[in-house]
Image (tube, helix red, strand yellow):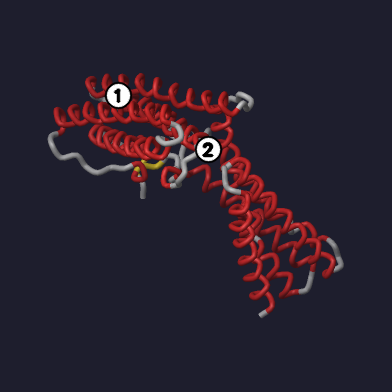
Amino acid sequence: MPKRFKDLTDQEILALAISLEEEDSRIYGDFADGLRESYPATAGIFDEMIREEHGHRDRLIASYRARFGEHIPLIRRHDVSGFVSRKPVWLVRPLGIQTVRKQAEVMEAETLRFYERAQERSTDAAVRKLLGDLAEEERRHEAIAVSLEERATRSHKVADEDQAQRQLFLMQVVQPGLAGLMDGSVSTLAPVFAAAMATGSSKDAFLVGLAASVGAGISMGFAESLSDDGSLTGRGRPWIRGPVCGLMTTFGGIGHTVPFLIPDFRLAMIVALAVVVVELIIISSIRHKYMDTPWLSAMVQVMLGGALVFIAGILIGGS
């Protein structure tokens, strides 16, 4: 199980900071390499950020050695709860300037938040000062990441927008809402249609679907609320994310459950199937618009998952 950030010692905080600086510098190296041919100026900015990240790492290592000795334990971001999961966009070629800009902005915002939180937790005066200095330098990096967006929007003549607010909206509302909608829409297909096929009764299918939807909503709501407190990730308060995820989960399951209020079983099945198709198209559209997933890829992934769960429900209910 990942360790909670608030339980880290000064030694572990420094070791984690060293790991983060090393990881970020390598990712920036991949960005620079992928952009050098088409965007040499932007690649040069990332080269400079790499040199600064190396400087941060060296200062952290010096501080660690002075306080704790030569051995630095391996503590990575996924060993500590609360960090945002990063998509490996740097492995895709060719790299898009917009994609890189978004990723760099999220990385710098997260690193800044980490140093601010780490400074608050540290009990050593020298370590607190170092972490505070690094936080100030990361603020400049964050400004550079934002400026990359401004250059891109000017070059493509698109309307200027507040990307920081968009990222906040994505992390606090869209991501938990989409996770809930996908889980509710897909996971309840099997029990609803299995009950429908097994009983041939619209009422029984509705009751099963209602129970599955509400139960899944409660489960997903608690899971999202307990995943992290939002202090490090910036994903917002858990008591906001949890209800958003839970309500969207329930809504996703209720959509294809409501048609079974129709007394005519055959008609109810037809309407429910139509609703399922609409639900999956809506989910694909949201993933395409907000999560930068290619439209075809989003459709194939969502439709395939939904189809497999639906078939499982039909086969189980008809057995």
In the picture of the structure, the residue carrying the numbered disc 1 is 131
Viewer-nearest residue: 203 or 76: 76
Quarter of the image with the C terminus in it: bottom right
Residue 10's disc is none
Asked if residue 136 can be seen in this view, the reply is yes
In the image: residue 19, left or right of residue 184: left
Say above or below: 317 vs 243. below
For mark 2, give the secondary structure. helix
In the picture of the structure, the residue carrying the numbered disc 2 is 238
Please report the residue visible at 74 percent of the width from the left and 54 percent of the height from the top: 278
Please report the residue visible at 46 percent of the width from the left and 35 percent of the height from the top: 38
Counting from the top left corner in percent of width and height, residue 30 is at 37, 40
In the image: residue 53, left or right of residue 182: left
Q: Which is in the foreground here, disc 1 or disc 2?
A: 1
Residue lying farthest to the right in this orientation? 264
Q: Three-letter amino acid code at disc 2?
A: Pro
Q: CA distance from mark 1 to mark 2?
A: 27 Å
Q: Three-letter amino acid code at disc 1?
A: Leu
Quarter occupied by residue 141: top left
In the image: residue 117, left or right of residue 61: right
